[in-house]
Structure formats: structure tokens, C-alpha cells
Amino acid sequence: MKFEIKDTYSGDVAILLTHEADYVPAELDALEAGLAGKVKAAVEAGRFRGKAGQSFEYFLSSDAGPKKVILVGAGKTAELTDAELETFGGHAAKAVLNSGYKSADIKAPSARALAGARLAAYRFDKYMTKLTDDQKPSLETITLVTDNVSAAEAEWVGLAAAVAGTEMARDLMNEPPNVLHPESYADRIREMEELGIKVTVLGEEEMTKLGMNALLGVGQGSVRESKMAIMEWKGGGDEAPLALVGKGVCFDTGGISLKPGPNMQDMKGDMGGSAAVVGAMKTLALRKAKANVVGLVGLVENMPDGNASRPGDIVTSMSGQTIENQNTDAEGRLVLCDVLWYAQENYKPRAIIDLATLTGAIIVSLGHDNAGLFSNNDELSSQLTAAGLAENETVWRLPMGSSYDKLLKSQFADMKNIGGPAAGSITAAQFLKRFIQNDTPWAHIDIAGVAWKSVDKAPTDPSWASGFGPRLLDRLIKDNYENA
């Protein structure tokens, strides 16, 4: 689909943003003489009053110009936040995507509306073989109509890159696990070299030499070889990079600590943290970010094979610390701890952020509206919170402390990989913190509640996978880590 910016209407459908104080805009007359009066008469016979979420359609009989006008209500005021403008764009796209029309114009003051439309237009139907024509999108072009084309085009450069990163994260998560596994995932990451990203992939032989036994233990029950992919974007000066680390468990059965069968298919999305990192790296490359960033993802499958890790096994991590594996379904932290250590040993990052669909407990705590944030650094936490609010990918900080850390004590090793029934998300974060060196600024983002959901979804979030993360990370980097 094409996304354009112009200062005039040219599409089959014109979609205008309205509000309660002016729910039939005079600008309709620019589309057709006397149109505002006709629409007002039609509106007065119904209940449309420009309230948020309301819409009104009016068909035109003229041969020239649009064939239909859609008014979308914004609520009490025309002064909208970026998130509200994106929601408007999402409503606009959904109204015409399968309508039979080929082109639509959206009148809005910012390219944020176009970003919302592109997010809403996302589809993942590549495996659908029996879609009828009326089930397929007819829309080919969405155009933002604005009074300041140059400003909108400048804004769109960064927004389009961020949306592309989100689309990639969604694509990766939506793929079935027989298609996206550690080996094929690594191959897709290698393709990002075309964008100017340096990609290195380590296999099991290299990781064995490095002592990454925690990560390797998770994947030892799978016929698929475990991998670690490293993506380097050098757009800054000589400063140390920001490191982004993602959990890439391409499918999680729970291992020997087998998960219940219902909804296990969702565990193809247990690589959502890695998808966020990969999507963010794509965004940075597309907009040629003036920052040094390294993304590292540990790619494994957690399977209950005869060679699988057992509850009670003790492994020695890359850091030299030993871990008693009391529950093989608490595997993500075992993957992350070795990748975190590798990142610090090899890149000495100025800060490090990991993302993971780590615990079901975070859904109990925060539901599906916020990701959980854990950190050893107040400044980094504040930066992430601000970035999340700006991009509508919000995080909420939870506490950490020595009393929680004590719950990881093991009789037989330096630590165990679960803390017990209480504070599950916090003890998972405490586990990861044990692998952060020298008080390096670090944040852990548990995205288990926001990586996917099936109900109560925003218009800009049309697929199973939300693609949470790339826009949050991109905004953090743009605001705090990028050279002028």
C-alpha cells in the first residue's frame, strides 16, 4: 500500500476529523459546493455529534471528486495528542480498507494520523489461500491532506521508519514456529546487512567455547541449533554503544516442566523481546540514527526432548555463576543472563536494556496496558517512561531490593532460577540484575502482557502480535542517545 502527503484531495473517499464544537466542518464545501449544508441536514436527523469514536458517512453523486465523505469524531476539542491523532488515522483506515474503494484522503494536521493509518492497515494473511475478493483490502493508497506538506513530510521520515520497525516485529511474532525457528530467524536477521547493519551470528560451537551454558541448556532438547545474533549500528561517534538485548525463545513448551495444552500455540510469541530489538534496529537503520547501538538476541527453542534440561540440573553461566534450574519453564532468564554478560564483556555499553515476554506474573500485576519496568538507574527509568508516554508504548516501574533477591537462594548453587509463588516478575528481574556488571545503567522490560492480546484492541493494533517495543526504543534513543 502507498502512503502519500498532499495539500489537495484526490481520493475516492475523504475522511475529516471533527469534534463536538464543530462536528460538521465548513471545509466540506471545498469538496463540493454546498456540501456542508447537505451533510448538516443529514447529521441532524441522526445522532452523530463529533463525540470520540463516532463516525458518519455521506455519499456523493458528483462524477468529479470523492465518492464518499466520512466524518470521524475526536471528542470535545480539536487539539489532539499524538496518540489520539494516530487513533484517528487508525479509525480512518479501518473504515475504508475493505470498502471497495482504492484511494482515501485523510485530513489531519500531522503525519501522526498517517502513521496510525499505516499501523491499522497491517495484515498478516500470507498463509490464507481461500480469501474472497471482498475479504481482501481494496485500498491501494492513503493520502494525508495537510496545509503544511513540507513539515508533514519531514515528520513522516522518522514515523515511517518507526512503523516499519513495528511491522517487522509483528511479522516475526506472527510467523508459525515451524517457519520461524532459531536458524531461520538468524537468516532473516542476516538480511538486515542490506540496511547497513553489521550482523554476526554465533552457533552452538562458538557459544560452548564462551561458556554460555545457561542459554545452551535451554535449547538442548530441540533439534534446532541455538543461535545468538548480534546487530551493530554505528551512526554516532566514538562513544560506547547502547546495548539492546532480546529474549528469542522461538517456541516455549515449558520443557520438562511442560506447560498446559490450552493456548500453548501463543508460545510462538515468546520471542517478542527479540522481535522488539530487531524491529528497533531496522528503524534506526532506516532513519540513519546518529547513535551507536548494538542489538543482541538469544534464539532458542525450549522443547521436552530426552536430552532436555531437567529440574534440578545445575549449569555454569558465562559469568561463572552457577544456577540451579528448578523449573525449566523459567527459561527466558537463562537465555538473557548469558546474552547480557556477553554484551557487557564485548561492548562495554553505556547502558543496557533487555526486553522479554518473561513472566505471566506481570499480567497479574499490570494487565495488558503497561509493560513492567525494572531498573538499577533512576535516570534510565525516567527516560523510558517518558519515551513510552510519547509513543503510547507505556511502561510502569516496579520495585526491586535485597528482600526479593533473597528468594533466589539455592541450597546447591549460587542461585536458583525461580523465586517462589510471590513477586514472580520481581524475582525474575532480580535474577537478571545479578548479571549486570559494575552498576552499568540497566533496565529490564517485561512485555508479556503487551506483546499480544486478542480482545479490546486499539484500531492501530489489528493483528495478534502488537509489535510493542521498536517505537519505545527508537524514541528513547532519539531523545537521549543521539548526536545532534
Image (cartoon, rainbow, N blue to C red):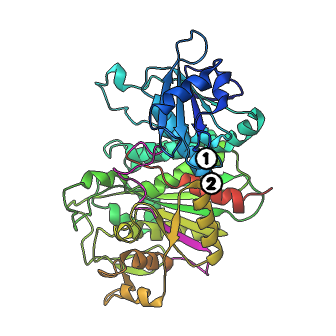
31 up-or-down from 253: above or below: above
User: Identity of the amino acid at label 1?
Assistant: Thr
Which of the 4 quarters of the picture holds residue 310? bottom left
Residue 293 x/y as whole percent: 65, 58
Secondary structure under tag 1 reads: helix
- Horizontal side of 139 relative to 238 (left or right) equals left
Instruction: Name the mark on residue 56.
Output: none
Q: Nearer the viewer, residue 83 or 159?
A: 83
State whether the magenta stretch is mostly helix, strand or loop.
loop
SS label for mark 2: helix
Circle 1 residue: 283
The residue carrying pointer 2 sits among few (fewer than 14), some (14 to 19) or many (20 or more) residues within 10 Å by Cα, namely: many
| Label 2 close to label 1 by CB (< 8 Å) | yes
Residue at horizontal 53 percent and vertical 61 percent from the top:
394
Total numbered labels placed on residues in the image:
2
Q: Which residue is mark 2?
A: 474
Describe residue 185's horizontal placement relative to residue 39 as left or right.
left
Which region shows up in magenta? 434-463
Side of 178 relative to 90 (left or right)? left
**What is the x, y in percent for residue 56?**
48, 32
Q: Nearer the viewer, residue 394 or 273?
A: 394
